[in-house]
Image (tube, rainbow, N blue to C red):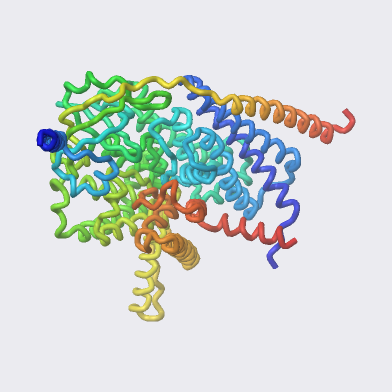
Amino acid sequence: MIPDFSKDDITVVSHHIGKIFIAFGMVQIIPIFIGLICGEISAVIDFFISIIACFAFASILLYFSPYLQEINWRQGMIIVSLSWLLAMFFSALPLFLSGHYGCYLDACFESMSAYATTGLVLVQDLDHMSYAHNIWRHLMCFLGGQGIILVALVFFFRGGDALRIYVGEARDDKILPNSITTAKFIWMVSLTYLVIGSLMLATVLLFHKVSLPRALFHGICIFMAGWDTAGFAPQSLNIIYYHCPFFELITIIIILLGATSFGVHYAVWTGKFSELREDFEVKVLMSTIFFTYFIVLVGFSGQASLFSDAFSFFRTTFYQLISGHTGVGYNNIYSSELANWPELALFGVIVAMGIGGCTNSTAGGIKVFRIGLLYKSIKREVRRLAYPESSYIKEFFHHQREISIDDTMVKTAMIITVCYILLYLSGAVVASFFGYGFFNGLFESVSAAANVGLSVGITSPSMPAFLKVWYIIEMWTGRLEFFAIFILIRFFVKTVKR
Amino acid sequence: MKKIKIIFIGLLFGRIIFLYGGDRTNVSALITNPTLFDGRIVQVEGELVGDIIEGSDGFWVNLLDSESAIGIWCPVVEKAKIRFLGRYEVQGDYVRITGVFHRQCGQHAGDIDIHANSVDVLQQGYEVPEEIPLEKAFFAIFLGIVSLAAIGILQVLSRRETHPNG
C-alpha cells in the first residue's frame, strides 16, 4: 500500500521551502545593487519590498516547521514543484510594482516564463524599463535555467536532501559523485561562460560604437537569456534590435552550448574532447536539427523569392529553427512574419520545438535523448523480430559511458514523451476554444510547454486570462517534466480529502 | 470660380506633397502587410529608443510608435539631429521618418527596415525625473518594520523553545 501523506511531510516540505526562500531573497540583492548604481530609487524600493516578503515568508515557515528528518523522494518532488510555483508569485511582485504589467497575472506569467526559460512575454513598454527590473527578468532566466533550487542547494542543503531535490528539478545525471559538487560545477561552468559570452557580445556592440555600459548591459542580458535558452531580450525588438548577423551567430553558439548536457561540458572541461563527437545526445541533436531543417526547406520550396537572397533565406529560416529546437525562442523576424510562413515550414519548427535540447541542459522539450532512445528501441524490436527467437539482441549507446538499452529506460522515455505530446495538444485545444485556430494554437502551445518562446502572435497582454493561466501551467509542467507536479497534485488531493 | 481654383491648386499641391512625402502609415501596418509597402516611400512617426548602432556608411536606430518598433537605417548626416534616445527616465526624440521600406532588405541581409531619406525631429526628447510614489515608499517602510519585528519575535520564541531554561 502507498503510504499516505502525514503531518511530518508538511513540516519537512515547509522547512525546506523556508530555506529556499532565504536564498531566493538574497539573490534579489543583485537588482538592488544595479538599481543603486543606476540611481533607480523606485526600482530599489520594489525589490526591497520583495526581499522583505521573501524573508518574512521564510521566517514563518522555518519557525513553524523545524528540521525533522532527511527529505524522502516524494517530499523532494513536492518541495521542488511548490517552490517553483511560490517563486513565480514572489518574483512577480517587483515586476508588477514596476508598472510595466497590465495585471498581477501578467507579471506571474512573465516570471514563470523566465524561470521555466520559455521566453514568452507580456511586458509592456519594455524599452523604458529600469535597468534593475530588466536585469531581474534576465537573472530569473539564469536561475531558472540552472534550476532555482540549485542556488539553495549549494549553500543550504545536506547530501541526501540535496540529491532528492536535485532530481526533482528534472535532472537525472550526477556529473560528479555528489549532488552538491555537481551543483557547484554547473554554477562554475555557467559563470565562466557568463563572463566570456557577455564580453564577446559586448565587444561586437562596442565595434558598432555602442557605449561601454550599454554594451555590457546588452551582453550580460542576452547571454543570460541565451545560455539558459530563455530568449528574453532587454528591448522589445528582441534580436532584431541589433541588426547584426555576426551578433546572431554568437548567440547561436551560446544557445547550442546552453542546449548541450552539462555531462558533455564536464567531459570537455576535463579534456575529453572526443565526447563531443561520440556522445549519443550530441549526435541525435545534430541529426534532428538537420531533419527538421529539411522539413523547413521543403516547406519553402517554390517560395524562395520571398527572400532577397540565399544568405537572408538561410539567416532567417535557420535562426528560427535553431532557436526553436534549442528552446531559446530568440527571433530575428517579427511574429507576424513567422505566422505567414508556409504551414509545412512552421510544422518543421513545431517538431523541432517539441523535441527540444539535451537532458541535463538548460533546454526544454521532450529532449533529444528520449527521441534517440525511442529510435534505438524501435530498431532493437525490429532486429528482435528479424532474428531467430533464441537470439539475444542488445542495443548500446554512448552517453558519457557505454549504456545498454533496457525496457525500464524505454518505458520511462515513452511515458514522458506521451505526457509532453498530450500537454502540447491540450494547449492547442484551449487556444482553439478561444478562436485562435488549431494550428497556430499548437505552435504557441508547443512553444510554451517545451519552454521555447517563439510566437505566432497569440501571446499578448490582451489574450484571455484562462489561456495565460493554461500557458503558465504548461511552462511549469514542461520544465519540471511532469512527475514532481503529479506528486504535488496527489499531495494536495490527499490533504484536502483528510 | 476663384475659390474653386484655390481648392484645386491646394489639392494638387497636397497630392504632390503626399507623393513626395510617401505613404503616411504606422509600424504595425508595415510589419503586418510588408508586401503592400515593399519598396515604397513611407512616412512613420514615433519615439527613437535604445541605442545608436553604427555601421560602415550609416547607422541604425530603432523607432517605437504606439504599438511596435522597427529598425531605421539612417545616413550619417542625420546623426547630429538625434539628441535623446528613449530609455528608463528618458523620453526619446519624437521624429518623423521618411524613407524606403524594405520587406527583405538586400543591403542588410534580409532585415525588415526603413532606409531613411530624412529624419525630422518633431519634438525633442527630455529626461524624465524619477517619480517615487510616496505610498510605495511608506508601504516598504511599514512592511520592513512589521517584518523585522515579526522575524525578531519568531527568533526569540524559537530560542526559548530550544533552550526553555535559559
Q: Quadrant of residue B16?
A: top left
Q: List x then y, in percent, for residue A40.
A: 49, 23
Q: How many marks?
A: 0
Residue B55 image position (x, y, % from top left): 19, 27
Q: Is residue A326 left or right of residue A107?
A: left
Is residue A497 found left or right of A209 in the rendered image? Answer: right
Please state, as top left, top right, bottom left or bottom right, where the C terminus of chain A lies in the image. Answer: bottom right
User: Residue, x 30% and y 42% (percent of image)?
Assistant: A252
Residue B71 in sight from this viewpoint = yes
- Residue reaching furthest right? B165
Residue A396 horizontal/vertical position (percent): 38, 62
Look at the image and tell me in which quarter the N terminus of chain A lies. Answer: bottom right
Q: Quadrant of residue B150?
A: top right
The extreme front residue here reads B1
**Residue shown at the point (27%, 28%) measured from the top left:** B95
B86 vs A392: above or below: above
Which is more toward the observer, A326 or A349?
A: A349
Which quadrant of the figure has residue B155? top right
Q: Is residue A325 or residue A342 the one in the foreground? A: A342
Image vertical order of residue A194 relative to residue A34, above or below = below
Residue B165: x %, y % from top left: 89, 30
Question: Which residue: 20% across, 57% down?
Answer: A300
Identify which residue is drawn at 61% across, 58% down.
A489
Query: What residue occupies the far bottom of the structure in this picture?
Result: A389
In the image, is residue B128 above or below residue A192?
Answer: above
Residue A172 can be seen, yes or no? no
